[in-house]
Image (cartoon, rainbow, N blue to C red):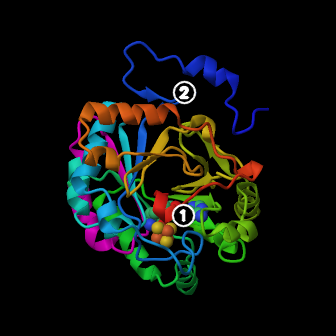
Amino acid sequence: MSTVHEAPARLLDDRAIPRAGERVTRDAYGRPITYLRVSLTDRCNLRCVYCMPAHGVKFAPRDELLTDDELIRVVRVAARLGFNRIRLTGGEPTVRPHLVEIVRAIAQTPGIDDISMTTNGLLLERLAPDLKAAGLTRINISIDTLDPARYTIMTRGGKLERVWAGILAAEAVGLTPIKLNAVVVRGLNDHEVPDLAALTLDHPWQVRFIEVMPLEGVGHVHDSGLVTTAEMIARLQERFGPLEQLPAPLSDPARVYRIAGAQGTIGFISPVSEPFCAFCNRVRLTADGKLRLCLLRNDEVDLRDFMRRGCSDDELAERIRFAIWRKPWGHGLREGDRNVGRGMSQIGG
Ligand code: SAM
Ligand code: SF4
């Protein structure tokens, strides 16, 4: 069996050959790269225990962050290269000034047909109508627990009622399908996996359980707190009986299931126990303007200073194409390789 470092020969044979007239950009392994996750900021109004250390997080000075124009330019040039899907993330994307204007500009970019956002939901109640009107397609909201006191502990200060208000506002304006993200940490919220999954019985939502990853500064949370997808599924089957597996696109990191009779679905994202590198279709743009080629590898190509030195759009496109070509095959968590280099909030999860 191939390791995550080693691309299966079949992929190299079948997929690395550009198709005639094809508009998408492929990496050296033949994977079509069409999905850009854009971090709008490294700042956040929470300090989740699995994302940021309690102390010592350094935020980038403002002049090191991409301006609105620079960010929108990268998206426009990426769209020329065949990117059609954008996700706004962070840090917390809703604390970025001019968020609605940024969404509108991206939504109007020719070639972009899906623009989504991942948020902690705290500011969503007020923002949801304007985001929908600006062209946001759908939203993922992080909610790790249904217990207000535990939420405050896990996020170091958040108010769960604000998240609920955000979820309901997003649903009311049609930012659907709503997906709820829960990072599962042993001893903190793992016993709530069945209760979180039970939300899907009466709501057409997808509740997604994420294996905790050892990002910079929070490796110990992974080391003592990892709960694998297999264990979560076993716990759910104890409560709900056999889960039905549903088809999902190969490039979707979530494996999707349904509890019998439920309105919604359950997704499992298993970067640690079952990496989906073979079908990875994404790269990330960090808030400070680096193209990050793999979430869990410290491999980045600068776009910010290149733009600030006055490159043309064609030169920028060429640099992005070159970066994609050298996208690493995959991460090395299973082999104990943790050269991640940054925290999740600095990369754009
Ligand atoms: N602030 C927004 C939020 O929390 O939804 C967006 C940024 S956050 C970094 C994006 C996603 O990464 C969230 O669903 C969060 O739960 C997840 N995340 C953060 N740290 C993680 C870790 N160490 N392992 C797995 N997922 C993590
Ligand atoms: Fe902030 Fe999101 Fe990280 Fe929590 S997971 S600290 S909300 S960026």
Residue 8 left/right relative to 38: right
Query: In the image as oriented, which residue stretches furthest toward the front?
Result: 309
In three-dimensional space, the C-alpha distance between marks 2 and 1, rounded to whole angstroms, equals 27 Å
Q: Look at the picture and state if 240 lies above or below 71.
A: below
Q: Which residues are magenta?
A: 106-133
Neighbourhood count class around disc 1 (C-alpha, 10 Å): few under 14, some 14–19, many 20 upward = many
Residue 341 left/right relative to 318: right
According to the image, label 2 marks what residue? 28
Instruction: Look at 57% across and 46% down and name the residue there.
Output: 253
Q: Which mark is residue 343?
A: 1
Q: Look at the picture and state if 252 lies above or below 57.
A: above
Q: Is mark 1 within 8 Å of ligand 1?
A: yes
The percent coordinates of residue 261 (x first, y second) are: 59, 55
Under circle 1, the secondary element is loop
Q: Does residue 141 show up?
A: no
The percent coordinates of residue 245 (x first, y second) are: 65, 45
Tell me the kind of residue under disc 2.
Ala
Instruction: Look at 41% across and 50% down and name the residue there.
Output: 290
